Amino acid sequence: MYTVLVIDDSASMRRIIKDMINSIDEFEVICVATDAFDAREKIKEYEPDLVTIDINMPKMDGVVFLRNLMRLHPMPAVIISGESVRGNDIFDDGAVGFIPKPDHGESMQSFQNRLKETLLNLTFLLKRYTLKKPQASKKHVLNNQNIEYKIHPDEVIPSKPASLPGIKLIAIGSSTGGVESLLRVFKKLPSDLPPILITQHIPYGFSNSFAHRLNDYSEVIVCEAKDGMKLERGHGYLAPGNMHLTIEKVGNEYRTKLLDTKKVSQHKPSVDVLFRSVNNNVGSAAMAIMMTGMGDDGTIAMKELYDNGAYTVAQNEESCVVFGMPMKAIQAGAVKDIIHLDKIADYIIDFAKGKRK
């Protein structure tokens, strides 16, 4: 059963859409919202598998809400709107479906059939999304307080820092706000760079399409990482939304290795796992970049990279959507340079040329 949040400012349309969706065996409307701000709170509370969004809404336009949703909390979204002229544009903004509201003279049965067909065609994506959808964290009770249990990277990948530098490469970690921030960075990158490895906290089912967006924005050839891919110059490798991305040396080559294990630092993929793997294999030859994000994923392994002589940088507070991850790395003494988002591409280029280390 896939859970749905219906967002529409019209009470009658909310009721119609809710009843139509509830008539489909695989779907259930668990809540409705009257505008974008109401929807934001409902998404936090109910964590639906799918949202339907009207474009013409008070307080915040539906397209603006969609863009914010894809930037801060990517999830399957279908536009249900009478503004069909904008239907094609919303796919570029991250929507997975568009259903025009009934035209004058169209029967409700016809509209229901169109809605049902669209949602059933999306079940393949929803299945992938919900299969690896983040679950509630385990909690231990101590002194009557709930404390989240966070798995240390030692439980997934041992720390064996490389004593000799390997190939030069760049590793990037990001979370909340990272989708748009990475696009801004990659837009400025040239093709002739060392391999780039990226762990962005993103739901399963969205990482492949995001890799394609990065590829389209950049001269770097970007793909969703698969197991056993050879690391090549001018290429970027994005962690799948349900696997840890690591690397290993095979003969004289370095290859990607995906780990389907438990979450680390509450995430899968985890920045800590990527950074530790990089430190184990190439050590001081690496550049590690901590970008916008909530929490502290990546701090442990970034400090290990720093201690091993790698070049480590963090995005500054001014340019972060959320300063959590960079702040924690800075507080841990794991960062050599703190830079604005718009300077990250320049620093990557300088590192590739041997000007920063």
Image (spheres, rainbow, N blue to C red):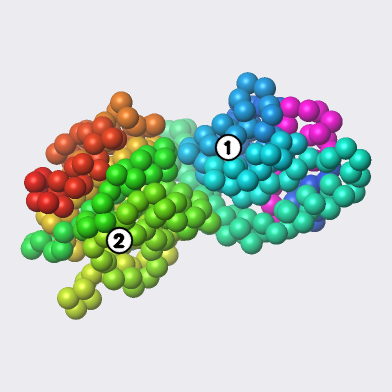
* Circle 1 SS class: helix
Position of residue 38 relative to residue 47, above or below, is above
Please name whichever residue, 161 or 144, is drawn nearer the observer in this view of the structure: 161
Please name whichever residue, 117 or 254, is drawn nearer the observer in this view of the structure: 117
Count neighbours of disc 1 (C-alpha within 10 A) and say few if under 14, some if 14 to 19, many if 20 or more: many
Amino acid on which the number 2 mark rests in the picture = His
User: Could one spot residue 210 in this view of the protein?
Assistant: yes
Badge 2 is on which residue? 235
Amino acid on which the number 1 mark rests in the picture = Leu
Q: Position of residue 121 (x, y in %)?
A: 70, 59
Please name whichever residue, 39 or 354, is drawn nearer the observer in this view of the structure: 354
The residue at the point 34 percent across, 60 percent down is 221
Q: Position of residue 172 (x, y in %)?
A: 29, 49
Residue 183 as seen in the image, left or right of residue 124? left
User: What segment is highlighted magenta in the picture?
Assistant: 1-18
Q: Position of residue 23 (x, y in %)?
A: 84, 50
Tag 1–tag 2 contact (CB < 8 Å): no
Residue 342 as seen in the image, left or right of residue 215? left
Badge 1 is on which residue? 66
